[in-house]
Amino acid sequence: MDWDELEPKKKAAIEIGEDLSSLSVEDLNSRIQLLEDEIERVRAEISARKSTQSAAEDVFRN
C-alpha cells in the first residue's frame, strides 16, 4: 500500500453540478467569485500559450 493512498483526498472547493439548494446567498456569491477567478486564470493561461505558440511559429517562419 502506498502512503499517499492513506491521506484523505481533498474535496474540490466547487463541484460542477452540485446541488445549490442548501447554499446561502453568501455562499452562492462566494461560489460565483471563485468561478470568475478560475475563468480569469484559465484565460490567462490560454493567452500565455497563444503567445508561446506565436513566438514558436515566428521562429520557424524565418
Image: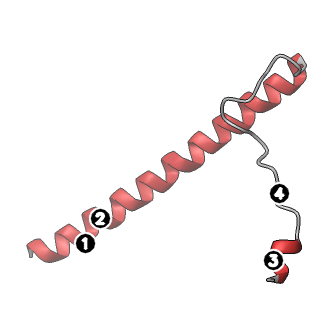
10, above or below 59, in the image: above
Which-is-in-front pick, marks 1 and 4?
4
Circle 4 or circle 2, nearest the eye:
4
Secondary element under disc 2, as helix, strand or loop, is helix
| Residue ID for mark 1 | 56
The image shows residue 35 at horizontal and vertical percentages of: 67, 36
Residue appearing at x 79%, y 44% in the figure: 13
The quarter in which the C terminus is drawn is bottom left
Front: mark 3 or 1: 3
| Secondary element at image label 4 | loop
Give yes or no for contact between labels 2 and 1 (Cβ–Cβ under 8 Å): yes
Residue 53's tag is 2
Three-letter code for the amino acid on which mark 2 is drawn: Gln
Does residue 11 appear to the left or right of 51 in the view shown? right
Label whose residue precedes the other's in the sequence (3 or 1): 3
Labels 3 & 1 near each other (Cβ < 8 A): no
Residue at horizontal 80 percent and vertical 24 percent from the top:
29
Badge 1: how crowded within 10 Å, few (<14), some, or many (20+)?
Answer: few
Q: Is residue 7 left or right of residue 56?
A: right
- Distance of mark 4 from mark 2, alpha carbons? 34 Å
Quarter of the picture holding the N terminus: bottom right
Kindly identify which numbered label has been placed on residue 4. 3
Q: Is residue 47 above or below residue 32?
A: below
Q: Disc 2 to disc 1, how far (Cα)?
A: 5 Å
Residue 5 x/y as whole percent = 81, 73
